[in-house]
Amino acid sequence: MPNYNYTCDNCSHTQVEFRKISDRKSATKCLVCGHKSKHSLSKPSLILTLPQDRWANEHEVLGNGVRASV
């Protein structure tokens, strides 16, 4: 289940909720003022790295337990 952002109509507070995809459009209650919050769009967050910086390269091992040369 993904996280969705909800913005309050009254105080503009944005909160993140963990919901089913089918329930994403239903309104929720604002945690700050108690008014109705509607589903709002959020920008995706991606972490891009260079191939030489990736975890797999740092932890790659050969079948005999010796670290492979990168």
Image (cartoon, grey):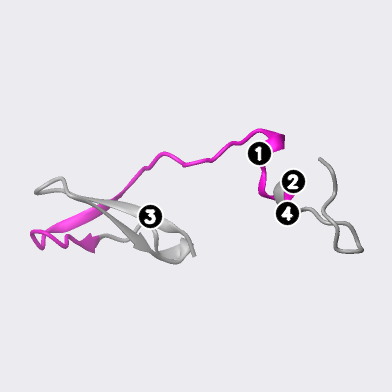
Residue 4 tag number:
3
Disc ID at residue 53: 1
- The alpha-carbon separation of the residues under discs 4 and 1 comes to 11 Å
CA distance for labels 1 and 3: 30 Å
Q: Which residue is mark 2?
A: 57
Residue 55 among those drawn in magenta: yes
Q: CA distance from mark 2 to mark 1?
A: 7 Å
Lateral position of residue 22 relative to residue 25, left or right: right
Ranked by sequence position, the earlier of labels 1 and 3 is 3
Magenta residues span 28-56
Question: Mark 4 is on which residue type?
Answer: His
Q: Are marks 4 and 3 in contact (CB under 8 Å)?
A: no
State the residue position of label 4: 59
Residue ID at (26%, 60%)? 27
Q: Is residue 24 left or right of residue 13?
A: right
Within 10 Å of disc 1 (Cα), the crowding (few <14, some 14-19, many 20+) is few
Q: Which mark is residue 41?
A: none
**Marks 4,2: beta carbons within 8 A:** yes
Q: Secondary structure at mark 1?
A: helix
Which amino acid, by three-letter code, is at mark 1?
A: Asp
Q: Residues within 10 Å of mark 3 (few under 14, many from 20)?
A: some
**Amino acid marked by disc 3:** Tyr
Q: Residue at x 36, y 43 (%)?
A: 41
